[in-house]
Amino acid sequence: MDDIEFQSIVSGEIEQAINFHDAEFTADRIRLMDYYLGEPFGNEQEGRSQVIATEVADTIEQIMPSLMRIFASSDETVSFVPRGPEDVQAAQQATDYCNFVFNDDNEGFLVLHNWMKDALLQKLGVVKTSWREQAEVDEEIYEGLSEAELNVLLADPDVEIIERDEVGYKEDDEEADEVEFQAVTYDVRVRRTTMHGRVVVENVPPEEFLIAKRVKTLKDAPFVAHRTTMTVSDLVALGYDEDDVIENAGLNAVDQRQEVQVRFQDVESTASVDRADPAMRGVMVTEVYIRADYDDDGIAELRRVVCVGEGNEILENEICDAMPFACLSPILMPHRLIGRSIAELVEDLQVIKSTLMRQYLDNLYATNNSRVVAVEGQVNLDDLLTNRPGGVVRARAPGMVQPLQPASIGSTTFPMLEYLDQVREQRTGLSRASMGLDADALQSTTATAVQATVNAATGKIEMIARVFAETGIKQLFRNILHLVTKHQNKPRIIRLRNQFVPMDPRAWINGFDMSVNVGLGTGQKDEKLQALAMIAGKQEQILLQLGPQNPLVTIKQYRDTLAKMAQLAGYRDASEFFLDPAMQPPMEQQQQPAPDPNMMKAQAEIELKRAKMEADLQLEREKIQAEFALRREELQMEMQLKGLQVATQSNVAPNIRSVV
């Protein structure tokens, strides 16, 4: 299909999603936000009590600490499980690195807090993951570079030459026949641009998240979009054409949405205005993930489309392999992506309690300042209407003024408020037992009964935590793993458990199974500590009786048990208390005492003397061998000389006889 037809399809999906959200969710979110902020209901009467119970805010704020303790108290929220023995090391590295990216590269605690609070209050919490490249620019000055060094510097693609001076010296000697030149050097100033990529995890306000109707799961959604406001400067920095961006700049529907204004109504009294600086003006940006048959092959593929302005002008259109969103909903509804919120469970209780409290306070006001019955003409009305402490009311006869005392409703109001608290406990699971045990209520109660009371009270909170873990948390870490394996193109050194460890996701296979580790409540942590303490006792017994080389327990396993106990106790770095045997030298090397410097010096002198003696002996040996060789040659020469003499004498003797 052509671009005009595709833009029409995208614009139609956006409009349908906006209409769907405005009709189904906007009014509910505005109402629930008003309840959370304790805003008036609109039925208040002047001169009557206008008190408002904060049931929605109290319930959410009581659940939040438990959820944050479950998910944010450990450095390893999610762990990847290897599918085969060859994946064990890679799975552990992926676990450590993805948790590091979430907790250290990003504000993991704040992301979790806002994400879960959105879900508890407004039915749906959304986070978005993306890979963001950031340029780090440094200027450097080099002096006295040779031509070869300059060529090496220019070969770096990250280096840009700003200034270059060629420095050469000539020695001109008038008496010499030739002119000698010294080697040319270069002074340069360069700009080095280094790109650093990282995974960015950010919260998406509920009103900025658009999705098609009747979606069961996020991965099957035919249309998902993030509709937000960005500045002209940010879009130009991302590489978009400045003219196209400026043409669509200005106040837009996202800035003026009623949900945004309600969120800031307690701190702002005026509407937002556009900025005077053109580079800081807002632009409505819609990042769309849509399944469409753009290439006319009969199969709808997932595409990422970036649109700007009210007319949804397309600036970018590319095929993609995954949606970067993860969603939370505290109370799941079958076959629906968006479930129910905790605020919906207690909003009616806030109205009822507010009404009861108002009526009780009005009754109390009337009791303290009750109406009176006065006989007409027998009482000074000016005195009667002037209500001041110790005031005098003049009357012509006794009994002319009688109080009209209203009936007190406190005896019926307080049991009703108590009943409403019980209803809230049944709906949300928040009870006195979950917030702190009542010593009087649990007097003469066994420890088992107390534990059962606490477990029953926290059951619904644990259910919400398990839903969060198995839905949004899992999807979030899958997205993080997908981004680092796809975009990180070089190893990265990170500090992990006080050690600097290289992480290279290119070596991983993006096919790990995943399990979510959540410590559901303090009680279960105590149970885990008790179980680990029992295991550590058995390991100690085996090591003492059978020795370190036994077939059941190793020293490393015992150390891992102690390290796990330290982590459950809240100490992130177990190496502060227990060393890792795998990181230590062999035992025989550890048992060797530290060398004495004096002893080392003496040993060095002895070794030097021994070497000198051996050299002297070797020299003497070679000298003796040379003397023997020389003596042997002398003897051979003497023997040869005697042989010649004997031969000479034998030849001369016959001649003499013949002459005679």
Image (cartoon, helix red, strand yellow):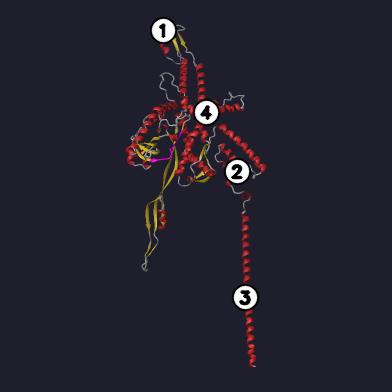
- Residue at image mark 4: 460
Which quarter of the figure has residue 520? Answer: top right
Mark positioned earlier in the residue sequence (2 or 3): 2
The answer to which of marks 2 and 4 sits earlier in the sequence is: 4
Amino acid marked by disc 4: Lys
Q: Amino acid at mark 2?
A: Lys
Mark drawn on residue 230: none
Observer-side mark, 1 or 3, equals 3
Residue 376 badge? 1
Q: Earlier in the sequence, mark 3 or mark 4?
A: 4
Q: Are marks 1 and 2 in contact (CB under 8 Å)?
A: no
Find disc 2 in the rendering and name its residue: 556
Furthest residue in direction right, as rendered: 545
Mark 1 or 4, which is nearer the eye?
Answer: 4
Quadrant assignment, res 542: top right
Going by the numbered disc 1, the residue's amino acid type is: Glu
In this figure, which residue is indicated by the disc labeled 3? 633
Q: Are circles 1 and 3 on residues that touch, CB within 8 Å?
A: no
Q: Amino acid at mark 3?
A: Glu
Measured as percent of width and height from the top left, residue 647 is found at: 63, 84
At label 3, counting other C-alpha atoms closer than 10 Å, the crowd grade (few under 14, some 14-19, many 20 or more) is: few
In 3D space, how far apart are the residues under numbered discs 1 and 4 (Cα atoms)?
A: 64 Å
Q: Is residue 600 above or below residue 177?
A: above
Residue 41, position as x, y percentages in the image: 42, 23
Structural distance between the alpha carbons of marks 1 and 2: 98 Å
